[in-house]
Amino acid sequence: MLSLSWPHVLSWRCRRQLLHRPTPDPLAVVRALAGVQAQVTSAAEQAVAVRQPVPDPASVRAAVAAKRLVKTWSARGTLHLLDVAEAPAHLALLAAARTWEKPSWQKTFVTAGQLEQISAAAWEALDGTVLSRDELTTAIVEHAGDPGLEEHLRSGWGTVLKPLAWQGLLVYGPPDGGSVTFTRPDTFLPGWAGLPSAEDAARVVIPAYLGAFGPASPATFDQWLIRGLSKKAMLKGWFKALLADGVVTEVEVEGERLYARTADLDSLAAADPADFGEVRLLPAFDQFVLGPGTADTRVVPPGRRPEISRTAGWISPVVAHRGRVAGTWDRTDGKVTVNLFPEHGEVPAASLREEITRVTTS
């Protein structure tokens, strides 16, 4: 069994997450990160731009307009940009948990019967067209004949629409000024063939996750995917099948048995903690911290989590150095303010100055 240290792993992840800026292609960045959180559109654009040789936030908008990227509710129930080709697999794994069938969910939001009505109405209303939230809400309420649905449908959190997204019934459409729109993926996105089985989806999503954030445990993957709510037998079965087929391999990282992609074993073994020492100023909601999770003390220093994961779900912009969070930063009126964590150790001053210049001029 391959034995690794966390400094080696974290150094390896820096390149896997494209922090060395090898490509201008936004699709390549989104694929490498297994999706980019897009709850805040500008943060998603910055997450891609910080990984491009020359920052180009407009390239993300162009990729969405070209239908290479799609925006929809994905991991942890948050909005993400996904590669159109891989989006069905991500959604299928989320749908496998059937979280909307839990009594607690139905008690808080809508019943199973009401959700069936919402799904049928949305499917019909969005056939070959794009509707605003107001237009979709009106169509669903009229179809269902249930005015009580309106409050849930108009919620900005979109809780009752997430199960529809996870079942491939709707995605975000082109923005209409400041308003969001929705449409059906099968009539909007080229090549959309519906959702695969959960087993087939796992063969896409788990290796994609491990390729950026591995080695990792099934529990860590599941926290990233759906806050640990996957059915445990299914989760175990997905990893067992990938292990049997040689797609993933067990490795040891400082005494902990974790999973890595078999294809990555050589590069993991060759990783050098000194290989990538540059500083990166990463935006809010960056996958660098969301991938392993803000509770991972190997990435986020112990005691610093409240400064990273803040109230109302806000994830702070972070200073990344050698695969770890070395501090936080902010930009106000064009001025960048950096707060370094002393316990991290020395951060290269020249590299930090270059990053600040890049942020202030982009």
Image (tube, grey):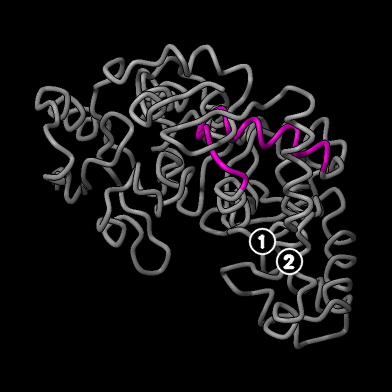
Disc 2 secondary structure class? helix
Q: Is residue 290 above or below residue 200?
A: below
Q: Position of residue 310 (x, y in %)?
A: 33, 63
Q: Is the magenta stretch mostly helix, strand or loop?
A: helix
Q: Which residue is drawn at 87% across and 84% down?
A: 145
Q: Position of residue 169 (x, y in %)?
A: 81, 54
Disc 1 secondary structure class? loop
Q: In this view, does 90 lie above or below 7?
A: below
Question: Can the viewer see residue 334?
Answer: yes
List the residue tagged with mark 2. 99
Q: Residue at x 89, y 75 (%)?
A: 143
Q: Residues within 10 Å of mark 2 (few under 14, many from 20)?
A: some
Residue 229's disc is 1
Amino acid residing under circle 2: Thr
Q: How crowded is mark 1: few (under 14 residues within 10 Å), some or many (20 or more)?
A: some
Q: What stretch is highlighted in magenta?
A: 199-218
Q: Which residue is drawn at 81% across and 78% down?
A: 141
Q: Where is residue 166 in the image (x, y as percent from the top left)?
A: 75, 54
Q: Left of 196 or right of it: where is 71?
A: left
